Image (cartoon, grey):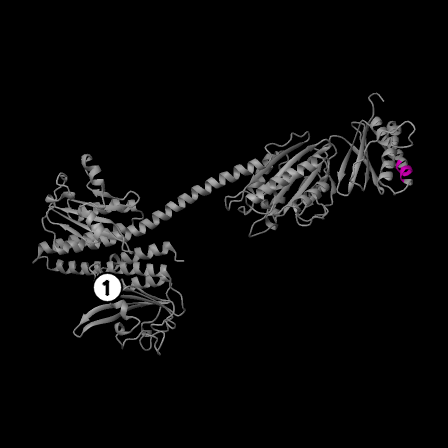
Amino acid sequence: MLDRRREHQTLLEVTTLSLRHGQDLRAILHDATVAATDVTGAQFGAFFYHDRDEHGDRLDLLTVAGAAAGAFPTTAPVRNTPLFAPTFEGGAPVRIDDVLTDERFGRGSTRGMPQGHVPVRSYLAVPVTSTGGRVLGALLFGHGEPGRFDEEAEAVALSAARGAAIAVDNALLLGAQLAARQLAEERGAAAEAAAVRTALLQSITALLSTSATTADITACVPRAVAETAGCTSAALYLADRSRDVLVGHGHPPAPPELAATLRTLDPAGDECVARAVRTGRPVVVRDAVAEPLGDPAVVLPWPTLSTIAVPLVDRAGTALGALVVNRDTVGPGEDDVELFVSVAAQVALALERAQLLDAERAARENLAQSVSALTELARTLQRGLLPRRLPALERVDVAVRYQPAVVGAEVGGDWYDAVALDDGVVFVIGDVQGHNTTAAGLMGQLRTAVRAYLTEGHGPAAALERTNRLLADQTEELFATCCLVRLDQGSGTVTVATAGHPAPLAADERGLRELTAEPGPPLGVDPSAAFPASTHRLRGRSRVVLYTDGVVESRADQLEGGGEALRRTVWRTTTDEPDISCEQLADRITANIPHRLDDDAAMLVLEYRGPSAQLEEAALPLPGDVRAVAQARAFLRTALSAWGAEVLLDEAELVLSELVTNALVHTDAPGGVLLRYDRGARRLTVNVHDRSTRHPLERHAGPDALGGRGLGIVEAVADEWGVSVAGDGKTVWAELAVEEGA
């Protein structure tokens, strides 16, 4: 497709060549040929000038672009060659995709071309015709490959031909005026008129070369014509097809009482303007007093003894309007009409170019408004899908950021969340494939599912497993990455599970590190996938950053450069500015992203104030037989003795025995025991893990029953108890506290 801006620039250059070269026809036509050859994409172009000598018509090869002049024939008359003859007769343009296969010319040794002509496959030719209808010559374009010229190339060639014709006419008129000026002493009046015409042509050409819009043209041309050509008034009437009227722009301005009458005219009316537009030919009124605007009741405010109305015709032959001049002389001559015809031709070409630019500008403005509206809609939808507020946490401050991609106006699939639980808080970061409404809708479903599974008591690994199976059942062939971070605010213990997502960054007194976990595949890829969890401990005051890949990824650098920039920002602020808030850190990270966003970016920045108490932990794996109970009791006694919590031994031993026994009876085998003692709160948590995800059921045993009282005993002895489901089973836990004063 042709570059419209290059086309406009080429037409402007061709039309204004007479400003550069004066009456040097060869220079004008050479530059016109070079410009047209370039913008049509031709391999070479040529201009043949049509003139007469003592033997009759002849065609001279005036100039060549893209090939040496010696490569063209000079012995045979080109106008007699079958391929070229129709163009020099002033007919329609000739465009041939392949000369070798065209049934009119694809035969014989020369294929319709002169002997010795350069090889041609694609061919395009347009006549160059003066404003008076005389064939000045032709522009010929060729290419050694077939199918190189399309309709747009033909349209540009026609425009270039029109521009060249205008430039030639201007040059010929300029030559005539210069010759007349030399005879000024003998023909003073003629020389003065010629100078006026020359000045008008040159001023109009200069004005149009700097007029980019229709408004520019209608503002400057009437004044220039009126002042330079000595007219009492001049106007441009342009067709407004939406209202079916001709709208006038004149100089001098009409008085208020005539403004409405002169501003708009009926294209079907009797005025000379309307007739010129309808017929496409100049209309001359030699006694305008008898026919002012076709209405004897209208008295024009300026002296008017004659009127010339010249149509403004575009390259498709459509009348864009008319140039109208009023004069205080009775009889305009042929030279006057020819002068204004030349002016009108230049104005029409400039108007056509300006209208294209006006339409392009309007389209850009409409597109910008549409993009702005879509962007705002996308952000509104995104805000509606993300959590409106995050929970207030005792020992954690949270800052969140979401920034849509700068390319496009669609919603995206990144999300974040924080779910407060009885025994901690889980932070969620995720990214659905794609940047459209489907991805955003799926993101909303996944966020709801993850939140529901976590609220039910499932750990990070189990929540990812269930969400993965849910996504695999969806009809959309989409996938998502996700990372879950569970934080025990009291102990600083962090449990991480990830589904193809970048690991969070943590900075504390031990340095900067990733909270890694063995990664599972993205959600929706493998319905049976497992997502192993890993445990980390935050020491003292810590910062944790969860993010999507849009924060660190760009087309140019992928993950490495952005990831390094993120790590550098987190670590520098931790070491050099330890007192800045998580909100300030989030701003720093956003500002230091070393690229324009190609993807949505979401992030959670956590400021953890450190553990609230000194915790002690001890873990023991258990065998799958009756030895497990005895081993668990011995392990408990040793641990409580080491922690100075023997006061809890009797109750803890009873609870632990019942939980281990229950696991042995109702599952394949218990997985292990985890004891956690909070010295500050003097509180013990007993955790027994097994490989079954089925919740234990409390039974009501009769007085003579031998079993079924285990959970009842736990209920009676423990302060609190519950069940947490993990990916590979569940954990039944119970808490016991030292009574005050004990």
Q: Does the magenta stretch include residue 630?
A: yes
Q: In this view, does 126 lie to the left or right of 195?
A: right
Q: Give the range drawn in magenta.
A: 628-632
**Residue 708 picture location, percent across and down:** 87, 32
Camera-side residue: 86 or 677?
86
Residue 170 higher or lower than 74, as above or below: above
Which quarter of the figure is the C terminus placed in? top right
Q: Is residue 79 left or right of residue 569?
A: left
Tell which residue pokes out farthest to the bottom in this image.
Answer: 109
**Residue 389 picture location, percent across and down:** 60, 32
Tell which residue pokes out farthest to the left in this image.
Answer: 186
Residue 702 higher or lower than 165, as above or below: above
One can see residue 362 in this view: yes
Tell which residue pokes out farthest to the top in this image.
Answer: 741
Mark 1 sits on what residue? 25
Q: Is residue 507 left or right of residue 434?
A: right
One can see residue 209 in this view: no
| Quarter-of-image position of residue 152 | bottom left
Q: Does the magenta stretch include residue 459?
A: no
Camera-side residue: 432 or 11?
432
**Residue 409 picture location, percent across and down:** 50, 43
Q: In this view, does 715 lie to the left or right of 205?
A: right
Camera-side residue: 558 or 613?
558
Q: Is the magenta stretch mostly helix, strand or loop?
A: helix
Circle 1: element type: helix
The amino acid type of the residue labelled 1 equals: Leu
Q: How many marks?
A: 1
Disc 1 residue crowd, few under 14, some 14–19, many 20+, Cα 10 Å? some
**Residue 247 picture location, percent across and down:** 25, 43
Q: Residue at x 63, y 34 (%)?
A: 398
Which quarter of the figure is the N terminus placed in? bottom left
Residue 565 higher or lower than 454, as above or below: below
